[in-house]
């Protein structure tokens, strides 16, 4: 559980931290890489301890695929939420040290959609994007970490997939594909971020569950 707290902290701190503290200097492309590299670091550093889920949607996918128990799933999700909140809090403390920073204006890399948010995409576009890309991401995670996958490459493959997803969707929703990543910043920002949080919980969990069911069906049809 400590590994999940720490790993989720790493993901949110480097990903959202890049957006909040350096976004105006590095742009969307580098922010996408920050999220991807954070996953690579956490996967190789902590994967042997907890599997480095760092994401309730990934844990739900593992649950649906029959790879973890309901009690472990619950413990993982709680740990991931704690890690995300701690990371968002640290980012807030650091960002507040700069003159002119305003939480309501500058935010903490929170996810949202619609009027006044980045590309101003509709709720249907946001739901579709988050569900589809989470399905792709969790399918990649489960596939790259199964026993017959090439050894030693899972962390890189997962990180590159997350970076690619961000390259497609940052201007749309800020990219969640991870309810914990959305929860941490929303707790501090409140307002629209908290009001929109349901979408970044529901859509990723649906995508993750579908990926888990697909993985289970594939393993059942093609046992090792």
Image (spheres, rainbow, N blue to C red):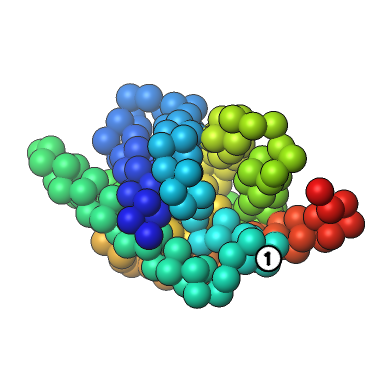
Report which residue position mark 1 lands on: 66
In the rendered image, residue 80, in percent from the top left (x then y), is placed at 40, 59
Quarter of the rendering containing residue 148: top right
Return the x and y of residue 73 as percentages of the image width and height: 51, 68
Q: Is residue 37 visible?
A: yes
Return the residue nearer the eye: 56 or 42.
42
Q: Nearer the viewer, residue 129 or 114?
A: 129
Q: Answer yes or no: is residue 209 visible.
A: no
Q: What residue sits 22% from the left and 54% below the top?
A: 89
Viewer-proximal residue among 89 and 77: 77
Side (left or right) of 179 relative to 219: left
> Where is residue 166, by image quadrant?
top right
Considering only vertical position in the picture, is 80 above or below 163? below
Q: Residue furthest bottom?
A: 71
**Would you say 149 lies left or right of 75 here?**
right
Give the number of callouts. 1
* Residue appearing at x 71%, y 37% in the figure: 149
Residue 162 spot, x, y in % from top left: 56, 39
Q: Residues within 10 Å of mark 1 (few under 14, many from 20)?
A: some
The x and y percentages for residue 211 are 71, 57
> In the displayed structure, does residue 37 sit left or right of residue 90?
right
Indicate left or right for 11 with 175 as reference. left
Q: Residue furthest front?
A: 224
Q: Quadrant of residue 31?
A: top left
Q: Residue at x 66, y 49 (%)?
A: 142
Tell me the SS state at disc 1. Answer: loop
Where, quadrant-wise, is the N terminus in this rendering? bottom left
């Amino acid at each position: 559980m400590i590994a999940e707290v720490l790993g989720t902290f790493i993901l949110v701190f480097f990903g959202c931290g890049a957006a909040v503290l350096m976004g105006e200097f590095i742009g969307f492309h580098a922010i996408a890489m920050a999220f991807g590299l954070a996953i690579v670091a956490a996967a190789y550093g902590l994967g042997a301890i907890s599997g480095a889920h760092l994401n309730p949607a990934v844990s739900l996918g593992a649950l649906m695929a029959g790879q973890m128990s309901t009690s472990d799933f619950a413990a993982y999700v709680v740990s991931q939420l704690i890690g995300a909140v701690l990371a968002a809090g640290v980012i807030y403390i650091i960002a507040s040290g700069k003159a002119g920073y305003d939480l309501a204006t500058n935010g903490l890399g929170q996810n949202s959609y619609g009027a006044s948010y980045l590309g101003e995409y509709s709720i249907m576009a946001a739901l579709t994007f988050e569900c589809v890309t989470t399905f792709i991401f969790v399918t990649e995670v489960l596939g790259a970490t199964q026993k017959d996958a090439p050894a030693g490459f899972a962390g890189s493959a997962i990180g590159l997939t997350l970076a690619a997803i961000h390259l497609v969707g940052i201007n749309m929703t800020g990219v969640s594909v991870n309810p914990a990543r959305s929860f941490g910043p929303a707790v501090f920002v409140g307002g629209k971020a908290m009001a929109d949080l349901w979408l970044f919980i529901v859509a990723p969990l649906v995508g993750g569950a579908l990926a888990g069911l697909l993985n289970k069906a594939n393993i059942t049809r093609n046992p090792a």
